[in-house]
Image: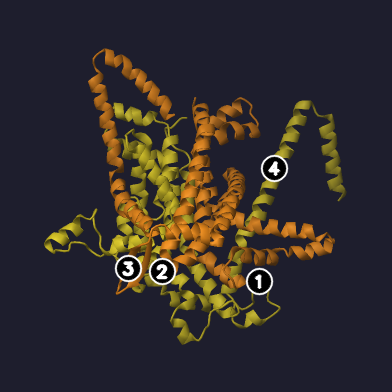
Amino acid sequence: MSEKNLNTEAQAAAPAKTLKLGKKHRGIESLKSTYGRMFVLHWEIGLLLFFIVPLIKSLYFVFCEISFAGGAFQYTYIGMENIDYVINENANFTKYLQTTVGSMFGSVVVIVILSLILALLLNQKFRGRLFFRALYFLPVIIASGVVIEHLFSTTSGELSSSGVSDSFAANMLSVDDVLNWLSLPTEIGVFFSTMLNNIFNLVWNCGIQIVLFISGMQSIPDSLYEVSKVEGATKWEEFWFITLPMLSRTLILVIVFTMVEFITAKDNAVMSLAYTFMGSTINYGTASAMLWIYFAIVGVIMAAVIGIYSLLFLRRWDTGGRS
Amino acid sequence: MGNVIQKARDLFYKFKNASSETRYKMVRKSSSVLFSLMRYVILIAIGYIVLYPLFYMISSAIRTRESFFDPSVIWVTSEVTIENFKLAAHIMDYGKSFLNTLIYEMVAAMIQIFSCSLVAYGLARFEFKEKKILTFFMFLLILVPSQMMMLPIVTTYTKLDFLGILGLINDMTGVDLRVNILNSVWTYYLPALFGVGIRAGIIIYIYLQFFKGLPKELEEASWIDGAGPLKTYFRIALPSSGVVIMTVTVFSIIWHWNDYYLASLYLYAGSWPLAVKLSEITSASELGTLRISFGPDNPESIAIVMAGCLLFIIPVLIMYMILQKNFVKSIDRVGITG
């Protein structure tokens, strides 16, 4: 969209130059960019003060050994030792990194599709819509804070998400009993119970995505659907040719958000490893090294996903949806 | 019974004798009925998974001590008690903590909603050189969790400085102008004001995606009519982004409401918000006097924790219910065509 606009602006500016009005045109452009800078000025200051400077400091910690003595932190420069330890000596880190990144892709795909389906259902007009929307909003409140931790610790006695879903699933349907009753082989039983556990975790991670999708759907103009109804499009065609293209921006937002949620979740393998290291001051440098390596790798993956997505879909759908 | 069979037979003959057009209509109608039935089945089935913990919380929060040991009680007891709620509210110091949450977290949430929308508008609508690098920093802001910068942030707050200028003044003249803002509202307000507060990155990104998708025509018209950038922003862009503002408001409030990590880092025990109080409920000192030990084996403690959790989520739930109505109302955006 923006490139297309730029082109038209450039075309408009070209004849103006021949009319010797070029200077004035450039003036408007630079004025507009000044306005743009005005809008983000406070953010630039904030970024510098509360983000970039602390971030650089934490990068410095990667090359430090930190100790707490005499009421103040002491930083001693030790070079690449922390990084060397994390990559070569710590047996768990690389293994955890692989499993975390691998399972990230799987769960992101499933969560995005599941929440899209639920949002589509919740966005239609039907009896009890408000009730169901409030219902599906519950995970947003409960899952992202203290409450879920208390739920974990009181229900299973251990702070692990698999533990809690096991016990929830067992309480809910007691799959094993049903399977015994049906006398099915145990492999199928195992498959079903892992499915059920995963469904629990996945549904609980869908809350915010559903809200994002619904608000995205609500900003699609009704006129598009009216036109498609006049043209005799089926619901299926409406979804593929109107809803999905118009949701292209929401979709990448949801994908990025889901990835970040998964990556920064405290209970994923790499993060919990880093946090155990962060617990003691002496290992803070090692923990910083772990997190920096982790986020560097994940950042590259995310940039690749966003790049590929906008190359494949955003450009095409943007012009397609709007023309 | 015979009546039903008669009706079904009638329907069948009606279908058989109908013209192709009415047949098509009948099939379509019955399929839409099937579809809405399916919808309810899916929503209720998944809704059950969502509701289960809430049932669990309520069921254990309203139980009396005796009923936990009564094997005949599964979900609901005959004797309902609110004693657990009273105890939980007492332990969490509910009134004061609630006020703290409002003062520290909710005000910051409101500030953030506004400051982030400014940033996103600037990034979405204007072209300038630094935009690419700023977008890069936005993604960094989304990606990097606050835990990673825990130590540097706290040291920044104990001696608030701007690029070391105040420190330099201190070195040269001996006058220390650097203030300690820990345990004050500014630990929340300042980052929120500058658009780098709790999850500011993702909030900016939500706004950004929305503003980019918003048709430019109205704003261009207002530019032509001689309105400045601020006027265009307040009169045109903000009024037509009701949906996204509502979404962001809900998220910002909830993320601030649930924040206990930063609060326990920035604030001292006296000014803790509800979330920290709830997370500390199992180790609160009041319990020693009540002789309750916390653990999964002690059902009385579970009842109190669950009552605390309910007290914690109820205000947010009410907030959502109120905003929800506006959510639906703000669907019909005025004056925008695709």
The alpha-carbon separation of the residues under discs 3 and 2 comes to 10 Å
Q: Nearer the viewer, residue B302 or B65?
A: B302
Circle nearer the N terminus (4, 1): 4
Which amino acid does the dot numbered 4 rest on?
Phe
Q: Residue furthest left?
A: B173
Residue type at mark 3? Answer: Phe
- Chain under disc 3: A
State the CA–CA distance, disc 4 to disc 2. 60 Å
- Position of residue B276 relative to residue A207, above or below, is below
Q: Mark 1: which amino acid?
A: Trp
Confirm whether residue A69 shows in the render: yes
Q: Which residue is mark 4?
A: B35
Which residue bears the numbered disc 2? Answer: A282
Structural distance between the alpha carbons of marks 4 and 3 = 64 Å
Q: Identify the residue at image location x=34%, y=27%.
A: B221
Is B310 placed above or below B205 here?
below
Chain (orange): A
- The 10 Å Cα crowd at callout 2, few under 14, some 14 to 19, many 20 or more, is some
| Chain bearing mark 2 | A
Characterize the local packing of mark 1: few (<14), some (14-19) or many (20 or more) Cα atoms within 10 angstroms. Answer: few
